[in-house]
Image (cartoon, rainbow, N blue to C red):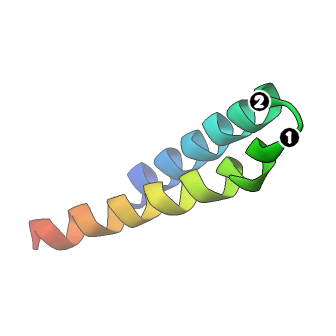
Amino acid sequence: MYLKAIIATLAAWFVGLLIDVNLGSGDWQILCLRGLLPVLAMGLCILSELKKK
């Protein structure tokens, strides 16, 4: 479970970083996807483990 959560969080951070960099400057910088996506990924990992139990 921990390895899955770590890999999902790092992958989400990397994807968010790529999206943030490629969108350029403007109103899209407010999204901060490199911070939002890892939080969502970790939350989904936690919820999936709670659902299994």
- Give residue 19's position: percent from left, percent from top: 69, 32
Q: Residue at x 11, y 65 (%)?
A: 52
- Give residue 33's position: percent from left, percent from top: 66, 49
Kindly identify which numbered label has been placed on residue 46: none
Q: Count the marks.
A: 2
Q: In the displayed structure, would residue 35 be above or below residue 34? A: below
Q: Residue at x 33, y 68 (%)?
A: 46
Q: Are marks 2 and 1 in contact (CB under 8 Å)?
A: yes
- Mark 2 = which residue? 23
Element under disc 2:
helix
Kindly identify which numbered label has been placed on residue 26: 1
Q: Residue at x 47, y 59 (%)?
A: 40
* Amino acid marked by disc 1: Gly
Give the spatial CA distance, label 2 vs label 1. Answer: 8 Å
- Give residue 39's position: percent from left, percent from top: 54, 63
- Where, by quadrant of the figure, is residue 51 drawn? bottom left
- Where, by quadrant of the figure, is residue 43 drawn? bottom left
Q: Residues within 10 Å of mark 1 (few under 14, many from 20)?
A: few
* The C terminus sits in image quarter: bottom left
Toward the viewer: 8 or 31? 31
Toward the viewer: 3 or 12? 12
Residue with the most extreme right position: 25
